[in-house]
Amino acid sequence: FLEERENTNYSLKNNSLKAILDLEYKASKSLRFTSQLGLQYDANKTEKFAAENTYFTRKMRENTRYYKDGKYNYFLPAGAVKQNWDNDFFQYNWKLQAAYSTKINKHEIDLMAGTEIRKTEDNTTITRAFGYDPATRRATAIVFPNSSFAADKRYETYREAAPIENAYASMFATASYTYDQKYTFFGSVRYDGTNLFGVNKKYKYLPIWAVSGSWLVTK
């Protein structure tokens, strides 16, 4: 167990940058606008290393055994195995909101409306080095005995995963009216749209609404 730990290595490096910008504008005593922009960028680098005599490498090499010319051969070259995953993630989030509040005699009115837009992008690149020599930092190319082994994704040396992009858009509003600090009526509506809801346009936006009322019996 100790020898296995000494001959294997797993490292993860993360660089992250986040920024938030807030703006506020008061058009009048009753009307206020606010906006917020958020940015995030993450760069993740993962590396796994297994020396030639580790259990991981020996097991992988054993899986490449094939029979030819009266004897067993291995197409995985002798040496260590080094695997790297490079991931970049970026997202932005923008909000815009307006709020209006006023009181006229016994009438109180509160209105709020806004929108929010968010988008994420995720990219991953995978590289593998077989027959790797830590001293020279060089790998050995695999010579596959047939096309079936060559199509096995476990022995890919380079692959770019399909980019993952998701977008979100929301619109929302609330309104409330109170009379004489006793009777209150409230309503809200929200629309959320995203490509995650499917390709059909009628499912891209999900509406949510609610209405309610209250009576303060103590008054």
Image (tube, rainbow, N blue to C red):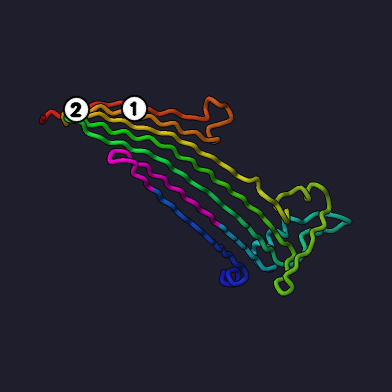
SS type, badge 2: strand
| Outermost bottom residue | 135
Residue nearest the observer in this picture, 180 or 195: 180
Residue 38 in the image, given as x and y percentages of width and height: 46, 50
The secondary structure type at the circle numbered 1 is strand
**Foreground label between 1 and 2:** 2
Q: Quadrant of residue 4?
A: bottom right
Is residue 27 one of those drawn in magenta?
A: yes
Quarter holding the C terminus is top left
Query: What amino acid type is highlighted by mark number 1?
Result: Ala
Residue beneath the point at 50% across and 42% down = 118
Quadrant location of the N terminus in the rendered image: bottom right
Region of the chain picked out in magenta, as a range: 24-42
Amino acid, disc 2: Tyr
Residue 17 appears at what percent x and percent y?
Answer: 50, 58
**Location of residue 14 in the rendering, given as x and y in whole percent from the top left corner:** 54, 61
- The residue nearer to you, when weighing 177 against 52, is 177
Q: Residue furthest left?
A: 218
Mark number, residue 210: 1
Snapshot quadrant of residue 32: top left
**Majority secondary structure in the magenta region:** strand
Asked if disc 1 and disc 2 are in contact, CB closer than 8 Å, the reply is no
Numbered circle sitting on residue 179: 2
In terms of depth relative to the viewer, which is nearer, 14 or 116? 116
For residue 131, above or below residue 214: below
Sequence-wise first label, 1 or 2: 2
Could you tell me which residue is drawn at 78 percent across and 50 percent down?
150
Point 22% across, 31% down: residue: 108
